[in-house]
Image (spheres, grey):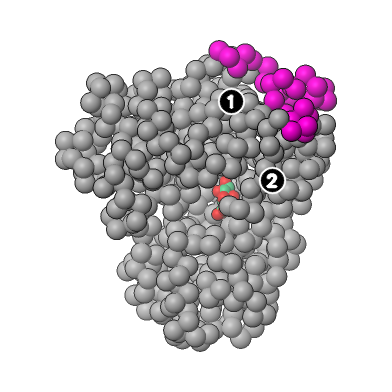
């Protein structure tokens, strides 16, 4: 993301003397925690694809905790698929960076040392494949966002017509997609008689392990049936539920953190105190003792993943679309309007009857804690950021709950309002007629539909509901059409703020 790219810091310039690095660690203020372990002795057991802010505030922190406790000697090699920005920011600082944990009570800053190197896949695909194929690599984890899986969100199947997949099938040794890299490396390991790595998806997809396993196998089958069969029987794809709110780092964050360090950090990450990671315990190639850092190891993550997607991410998306339309820049600002907070709570309450949780899970308490987290005034989490890629997010966040509620004969109007908010948003014009910068792989298609339908709910809602890759059969359900059209009609008539303020769930 260009807005997130730090300004270039030419190496050798004077400011590098004051740059965070191994050499400058002992000049940090004494209250800032730093890696208290010998980084030279760490081996690269984990390769992470998609080394963005989320990974660096979540999994990399878990590994840093384990290294500090002497519970592992595995570190992380991070790779960006395309952009050199993270590597360019982190390489001159020996991949060290600051984790700033912010709450109303203040900020806690700490230096993370678990990332050993950063690579850029597009610059040298063969080098990354070799790294993945290296027997030292035992886990390949991913945060490539929903769209990075090149699948059809509604069905969870590989999208064989996706341009990157088409490219990667034709050029298996110089892939572009994460899926292409995984399969290229697995094929090399198989050929060399090396046991496969475990694939660990850390994205907000439902059944993320199962889903990535299916996509990888389907892609491999386009190359060779034998390879697909080997992957199916030999490779473990444990599912995980990841949770930590990590807004994009801004230039203001960079300056504030660099000032506190007394030296420059080109790409710190900013987050909340809460963090959670629930992982299915299937790692035939071995793993660090994740539980020693508070990770919950379970045999089936599905119920927790559903709870998180349908409570946290669903209400996040609802707040993002409707909050943006109502003129709120951040989630915390949206939450200051008690009617928006009530809507978020209603989304969660409506999801609850669709969940089957292990005994002892307090869904209501979880929901209450989410409302608190969303209200954290110290996090500048933009509604625009969460609104991104709605076509990839809606199915698992909102639509699955709606389908379940319809099966249970329950009303769906709260979720319908959120979906209508998304529809209004993807027209790319806000309520004052200003352009919205819609970021979504389907933005062009959605905009075309909106242009043809015009700002008329009775035409726009059914037209968008016909997009199969998002809505599937649900889009054709008359109850769905009626509820979403009614909500969109209100949004056009009253605007988002008033619609939410007068909303009464059915
Ligand atoms: C957010 C998530 O950007 C989004 O779509 O809903 O990134 C959310 O902050 C995380 O899933 C929280 O764990």
Please identify the dominant SS of the magenta region. Answer: loop
Q: In which quarter of the image is the C terminus?
A: bottom right
Query: What kind of element bears circle 2?
Result: loop
Q: Where is residue 253 in the image (x, y as percent from the top left)?
A: 75, 45
Report whether residue 246 is seen: yes
The residue located at (65%, 67%) in the rendering is 324
283 vs 326: above or below? above
Q: Residue 210: name its quadrant.
A: top left
Query: What kind of element bears circle 1?
Result: loop
Is 32 colored magenta in this rendering? yes
How far is disc 2 from disc 1 in space, using C-alphas?
24 Å
Highlighted magenta segment, given as a residue range? 13-41
Is 65 colored magenta in this rendering? no
76 vs 504: above or below? above
First in sequence: mark 2 vs mark 1: 2
Q: In this view, does 453 lie to the left or right of 331?
A: left
Q: Where is residue 167 in the image (x, y as percent from the top left)?
A: 31, 50
Q: In this view, does 324 lie to the left or right of 41?
A: right
| Residue position marked by numbered label 2 in the rendering | 7
Q: Is 267 or 74 nearer to us in this picture?
A: 267
Report whether residue 317 is seen: no
| Residue position marked by numbered label 1 in the rendering | 114
Task: Please state which of the two labelled residues, at mark 2 or mark 1, is closer to the viewer.
Answer: 2
Task: Estimate how packed mark 2 is, as few (under 14), some (14 to 19) or many (20 or more) residues with alpha carbons within 10 Å.
Answer: few
């Amino acid at each position: 993301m260009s807005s997130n790219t730090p300004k270039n810091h030419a190496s050798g310039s004077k400011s590098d003397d004051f740059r965070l690095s191994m050499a400058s660690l002992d000049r940090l203020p004494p209250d800032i925690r730093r890696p208290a372990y010998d980084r030279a002795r760490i081996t690269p057991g984990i390769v992470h694809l998609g080394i963005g802010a989320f990974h660096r505030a979540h999994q990399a922190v878990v590994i840093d905790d384990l290294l500090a406790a002497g519970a592992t000697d595995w570190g992380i090699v991070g790779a960006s698929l395309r952009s050199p920005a993270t590597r360019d920011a982190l390489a001159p600082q020996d991949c060290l960076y600051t984790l700033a944990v912010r709450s109303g009570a203040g900020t806690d800053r700490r230096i993370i040392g678990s990332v050993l190197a950063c690579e850029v896949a597009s610059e040298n695909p063969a080098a990354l494949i070799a790294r993945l194929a290296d027997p030292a690599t035992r886990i390949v984890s991913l945060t490539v966002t929903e769209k990075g899986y090149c699948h059809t969100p509604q069905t969870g199947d590989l999208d064989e017509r996706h341009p990157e997949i088409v490219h990667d099938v034709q050029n298996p040794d110089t892939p572009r997609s994460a899926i292409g890299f995984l399969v290229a490396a697995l094929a090399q390991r198989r050929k060399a008689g090396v046991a496969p790595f475990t694939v660990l998806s850390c994205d907000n997809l439902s059944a993320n392990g199962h889903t990535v396993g299916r996509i990888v196998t389907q892609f491999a089958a386009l190359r060779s049936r034998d390879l697909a069969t080997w992957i199916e029987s030999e490779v473990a794809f444990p599912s995980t539920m990841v949770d930590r709110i990590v807004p994009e780092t801004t230039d203001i964050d960079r300056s504030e953190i660099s000032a506190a360090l007394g030296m420059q950090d080109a790409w710190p990450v900013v987050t909340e105190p809460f963090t959670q990671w629930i992982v299915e315990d299937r790692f035939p190639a071995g793993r660090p003792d994740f539980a020693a850092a508070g990770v919950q190891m379970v045999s089936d993550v599905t119920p927790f993943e559903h709870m998180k997607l349908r409570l946290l991410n669903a209400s996040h998306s609802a707040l993002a679309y409707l909050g943006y339309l109502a003129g709120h820049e951040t989630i915390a600002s949206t939450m200051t309007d008690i009617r928006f907070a009530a809507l978020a709570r209603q989304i969660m309450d409506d999801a609850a009857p669709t969940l089957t949780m292990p005994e002892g899970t307090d869904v209501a308490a979880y929901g209450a804690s989410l409302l608190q987290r969303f209200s954290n005034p110290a996090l500048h989490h933009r509604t625009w950021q969460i609104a991104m890629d709605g076509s990839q997010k809606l199915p698992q966040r909102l639509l699955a709950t709606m389908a379940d509620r319809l099966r249970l004969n329950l009303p769906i109007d709260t979720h319908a309002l959120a979906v209508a908010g998304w529809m209004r948003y993807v027209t790319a014009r806000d309520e004052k007629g200003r352009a919205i910068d819609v970021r979504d792989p389907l933005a062009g298609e959605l905009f075309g539909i909106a242009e043809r339908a015009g700002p008329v709910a009775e035409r726009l809602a059914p037209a968008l509901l016909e997009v199969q890759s998002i809505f599937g059969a649900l889009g054709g359900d008359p109850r769905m059409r009626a509820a979403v059209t009614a909500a969109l009609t209100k949004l056009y008539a009253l605007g988002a703020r008033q619609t939410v303020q007068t909303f009464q769930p059915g």
